[in-house]
Image (cartoon, rainbow, N blue to C red):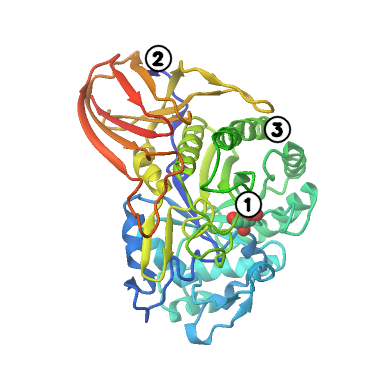
Amino acid sequence: MAKINVVFSESKGKINRDIYGHFTEHIGGVFYDGLWVGEGSEVENVRGFRKALVDSFKKLNPPVLRWPGGCYAETYDWRDGIGPREQRPARVNWWYSHDKRIESNAVGTHEFMDLCRQVGAEPYFAANMTSTTPLEIRNWVEYCNFPSGTALSDERAKNGDKEPFGIQYWGIGNENWGGGGQMTPEQCAREYARYSTVANSIDKGSMKFIMCGPNGHDVDWTSRLMKEWASKKWHEAPTYGMSVHYYCSFAGDPVAFTKDEWYQQLHQANYMKQVLDDHRAAMMEYDPDMKIGLVVDEWGCWHKDGSGPSKGYNLFEQQSTMRDAVVAALTLNIFNDRCDSVVMANVAQLVNNLHSLYLTSGEKFIETPNYHVFEMYKDHMDAKQLHVVNGTEQLAREGFRPMQQVSVSASEAQDGSVLITLANLEYDKDIEIELGGVDGLLTGQAEIKLLQGETPQDHNDFEHPTCVKSVISQRAFKDGDTISLPAASVMAIKLVR
Ligand code: AHR
């Protein structure tokens, strides 16, 4: 029988709660008919935001929300989203060429901040480094963060928010290797320095800037970006992180996948390890003290379009099955185990899009299997990561490094309770595991949450909203006891010792 051991004496430190972050872009159905239904809507709402979604989302204690893009940020003018809503300009946005939809700007800075307050999340603003000037970003910072007595801070007060928003996280640029201006890494580092230095002049020291990192595993981008970054003495603005975007995609059918495609998807998800480790190694040459964290501000599965409730109207909307839930579980375990270098991650995207936690249409609203994974994992936030010795078998596939049959991570909360999260990556094989501690005992009262479908293809839809949901059981657990992990399932064991 396979053994998994949690080592109490070995830890990489605290799991940054921001690893459990989310991403909400103005794209397809994320805001309009997803989060935002408008104050006059028949759909129950709180100041325009869909109440059912807000209530559910709040339960996850979401730490941080990235907004307004993505690519959308690269043509966004923040001034379009302030002032009386009925006077805001309709715009052709970044995604118009894909879906021919017009942006109403009904959701702007104040509405987004209201959403953050409603769900208790920190905002993470993605600022436009492609098509505006440094002055415009600086002005947005002043508008948001300056207390009062200037034209911009007084305008904020006039628009309904007297108190400054105090936005800490500012992403400077998005995918500048691609849609964000087709820059070279050297150009991107210089532009980043120019924009962040100017933005920082408003509010020195309280902001955390995030520089645009690579596309997936492009380590050359990271090395050249960091080399340029390190070659100057212009580090006026504190660089908190470098973004990484990695989607495990092969554009297959999200629901009708084969056993072979199941494994292909999971190997692609597991590749996240290589992506993070190789970028970290490249950064170390220029940042040996690891002052700059990895911010994986876009991750998830990217399947073929059109499987969501809008049947393709909402750009990139897709169904999420147990396969996506297992990808989420595996990915979050990977982040937990790299908590000494990953300081934030934002799954793409919250609702009606890629790897979503929710799907909506009019009044209809469901939680996808991904939602349950975030719910089951939430106690890892701010807990102390614990090393795990994973004795399960390895799964091989050509073109990939072998991966363990079971993905696992563990953490210890301040009250001494332990959370162990596991995902069985086997399509149709249940696994028995002997679970024990090293330098400490895994003995106590266990609350076990299990997420599984009848098949790996199972998912929730409006007709079957709870086809996949987590089931809770309790048991007294003794160090070395056995657990049964069904095929294609996710389990969270919370042990009060
Ligand atoms: O998440 C969808 C898009 O994917 C984002 O806008 C962009 O940054 C990425 O290419």
Q: Amino acid at mark 3?
A: Ala
Residue positioned most to the bottom = 87
Foreground label between 1 and 3: 3
Q: Quarter of the picture for ligand 1?
A: bottom right
Give the x, y percent position of residue 416: 27, 28
Task: Of the two numbered discs 2 and 3 on the same chain, state the one appearing first in sequence.
Answer: 2
- Asked if disc 2 and disc 3 are in contact, CB closer than 8 Å, the reply is no
Task: Say which quarter of the image contains residue 341.
Answer: top right
Q: Which residue is mark 1?
A: 237
The residue that appears at 57% across and 44% down in the rendered structure is 296
Q: Residues within 10 Å of mark 3 (few under 14, many from 20)?
A: many
Which mark is on residue 282? Answer: 3
Where's the N terminus, which quadrant? top left
Q: Which residue is mark 2?
A: 3
Task: Of the two numbered discs 2 and 1 on the same chain, state the one appearing first in sequence.
Answer: 2
Position of residue 171 relative to residue 101, above or below, is above
Secondary element type, mark 3: helix
Residue 120 in sight here: no
Foreground label between 2 and 1: 2
Q: Nearer the viewer, residue 52 or 163?
A: 52
Q: Give the Cα separation between the discs numbered 2 and 1.
A: 47 Å
Give the x, y percent position of residue 275: 64, 35
Q: Give the Cα separation between the discs numbered 2 and 3.
A: 34 Å
Q: Residues within 10 Å of mark 1 (few under 14, many from 20)?
A: many
Task: Say which quarter of the image contains residue 6.
Answer: top left
Secondary element type, mark 1: loop
Task: Of the two numbered discs 1 and 3 on the same chain, state the one appearing first in sequence.
Answer: 1
